Amino acid sequence: MTAHPSVKENSAKELIERLKKQPGSLVAATSGIGSYSHLAGEWFAANAGVKIDFVPYNTSSPYGDLVGGQVQVMFDALPAAIGNVKAGKLKILAITGKTRHPNFPDVPTFAEAGLPDYSPTAWIGLFAPAGTPAPIINKLADAMQKAAAQNPNLIAKWRSYGGELKAQTPAEFAAFLKQDNQLWGQAIRGAGIKLD
């Protein structure tokens, strides 16, 4: 969760306390209805028992308005926000994960704010068409292992942005997708989000 510097609170816990006293006193930007930032924000609001007004940006990046202070917060992947954070234009109120991020040891986790089950994760994966023969899938997986997992410079670059680089086997990635779908499904149902 990133915020404009004008937001007085410096943690998700403090922000939850404010929103319980002043429901709807915060406007959050999203990358559009149903986007990662929208669903992660709705999941947060539902878990915290607070009300947040969401503004969807469908054709432009919400970061311009977030940096300009027209909206106060955004739920997004750390690598997407880190440039503005390092430039002092935004601040991080909380991150996901069981422990604090080693590059941001002063930033509390959502678990520390009393939300241990709040765990949205943004990720990038490599997919192939259904029915692609196993030898081709395995060749692609091996190439990814060599290109990603065994490249210390690339790993260090991702970490500097707050990300974590993992090159999983096809079976590991399939298991991750199944677990991720269950988590997001629970979050979507818990927030009462429905398709129009």
Image (spheres, rainbow, N blue to C red):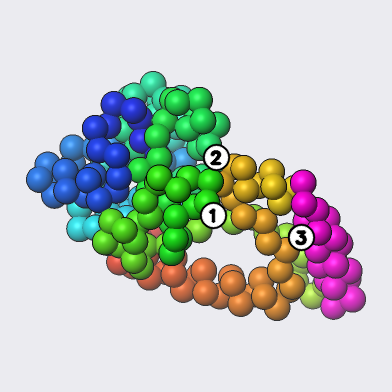
Amino acid under disc 3 = Ala
Magenta span of residues: 134-153
Foreground mark, 3 or 2? 3
**Mark 1: secondary structure:** loop
Side of 101 relative to 22 (left or right): right
Check if residue 140 falls in the magenta segment: yes
Side of 141 relative to 188 (left or right): right
**Mark 3: secondary structure:** helix
Q: Is residue 112 above or below residue 186?
A: above
Q: Position of residue 2 (x, y in %)?
A: 40, 39
Amino acid under disc 2 = Ala
Amino acid under disc 1 = Ala
Name the residue beneath numbered marker 1: 122
Query: Which residue is rendered at x = 16% and y = 43% of the image?
Result: 18
Determine whether label 1 and label 3 are within 8 Å by CB. Answer: no
Name the residue beneath numbered marker 2: 80
Name the residue beneath numbered marker 3: 149
**Mark 2: secondary structure:** helix
Main SS category, magenta section: helix
Foreground mark, 1 or 3? 3
